[in-house]
Amino acid sequence: MRDRIARLFTWLRLVLVPQPSRRPGRHSAAYLAEQSATTHPKPASPWNAPWQGPSAATVREIWREGAGLPQLQRERRWATAFAELGIDYDHPTLNITPVRGRAVSA
């Protein structure tokens, strides 16, 4: 009995309640034509582009060049080598002590 009542209400809802304009099904020719006309090209993903930075071998060579230098000279050498490649090397500043009461000129 419940099944008949549920089917009756479903049928009444479909017949009596106005429905918004229905779009064609996803596999119909009309839907596919509409989608192909309105699709926009997807933006290019940066992950699809080739790697723009230096290769691992190049970076390894730069690290080896400054291996025997004192720390400050080593950091400056690395920053210079990366600057030649067009890369901003943000060298660590852990060992820089704050200057108090003195003016420092670069």
Image (cartoon, helix red, strand yellow):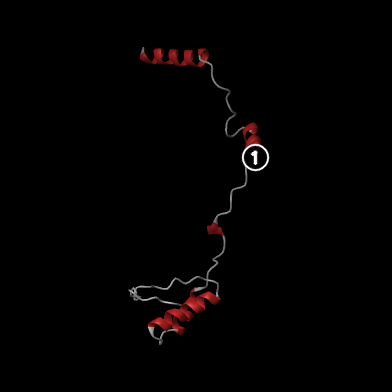
Look at 40% across and 12% down and name the residue there: 5
Disc 1: CA contacts within 10 A as few (<14), some (14-19) or many (>=20): few
Depicted 89 relative to depicted 9: above or below:
below
Kindly tell me whether residue 9 is visible in this rendering.
yes
Q: Position of residue 26 (x, y in %)?
A: 57, 34
Most foreground residue, 68 or 32: 68
Depicted 19 relative to depicted 66: above or below:
above
| Amino acid at the residue labelled 1 | Ser
Most foreground residue, 57 or 64: 64
Depicted 102 relative to depicted 40: above or below:
below
Q: Position of residue 54 (x, y in %)?
A: 52, 72
Q: Position of residue 23 (x, y in %)?
A: 58, 28
Q: Position of residue 20 (x, y in %)?
A: 55, 22
Instruction: Tell me the quarter of the picture where residue 69 sits.
Output: bottom left
Residue at label 1?
36
Most foreground residue, 63 or 29: 63
Look at 45% across and 16% down and name the residue there: 10
